Image (spheres, grey):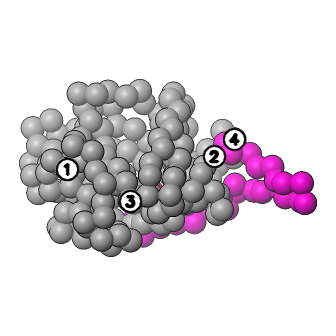
Amino acid sequence: MQVKATSLPGVLILEPALFADDRGFFTEQFNARVFAEATGFRGTFVQDNLSRSLRGVVRGLHYQLEQPQSKLVTCSRGEIFDVAVDFRRGSPHFGQWTGFVLSEANRQQAWIPPGFGHGFVALSDVAEVFYKVDAFRHASGERSICWNDPEIGIDWPLAGSDARLSPKDEGAPGLSRAEIFEIGSIGGISINHDGP
């Protein structure tokens, strides 16, 4: 497996080994031992999620204030522009973002640890995004921050008028008004329930 760092420490791009010939290909999509060696992750994935989006659909920026999730994201059909944003107040990278294309053609995966917001836009007519998480969904702890918040300044590859959003994401606050994470004194993440 090849591992590429991004501009946000902890967020990684992974490319599993591929064995191809004129019949097709084989790849280990996930191998716990190899993954742990590549990322340092020692937890357990407890849920697999799959979403299908049409061109121009933006999902995010999502995170879980309670029971935060690590995510291993793959685009198994089509192509997406995937984004991670550091939502850890006190981090030297707070509010910064990184983005990358994930597609069925490049077969790359994104590793997004807890404390980071996640979002993507579908670049193909149809995009299917599969992601593994290490904590169960906790609906009351789910949060969203405005996908095009100028304070974050994500350079999305679409015009704002072309974005297709859920009602939840349309009404999401900007970073300055959102409940976010706090960096603990030991370097871990502690949750700030009261917001900023």
Q: Are marks 3 and 2 in contact (CB under 8 Å)?
A: no
Query: What element does badge 1 sit on?
Result: helix
Amino acid found under the numbered disc labelled 2: Phe
Amino acid found under the numbered disc labelled 3: Gly
Q: Quadrant of the N terminus?
A: bottom right
Q: Are marks 2 and 1 in contact (CB under 8 Å)?
A: no
As measured in the structure, the alpha-carbon distance from the residue carrying label 1 to the one carrying label 3 is 14 Å
Q: Is residue 71 left or right of residue 186?
A: right
- Among the two numbered marks 1 and 4 on one chain, the one whose residue lies closer to the N terminus: 4
Amino acid found under the numbered disc labelled 1: Glu
Q: In this view, does 1 lie above or below 34?
A: below
Q: Residues within 10 Å of mark 3 (few under 14, many from 20)?
A: many
Q: Do the residues labelled 2 and 4 touch (CB within 8 Å)?
A: yes
Amino acid found under the numbered disc labelled 4: Asn
Label 1 belongs to which residue?
170
Label 2 belongs to which residue?
35
Q: In this view, does 125 lie to the left or right of 14?
A: left
Q: Nearer the viewer, residue 84 or 60?
A: 60
Label 3 belongs to which residue?
56
Residue at the image point whose x is 31% and y is 54% from the top = 164
Query: What element does badge 2 sit on?
Result: helix
As measured in the structure, the alpha-carbon distance from the residue carrying label 2 to the one carrying label 1 is 35 Å
**What percent of the width, then of the height, locates residue 150?**
18, 69
Give the residues drawn in magenta, as a range: 1-30
**What percent of the width, then of the height, locates residue 163?**
30, 60
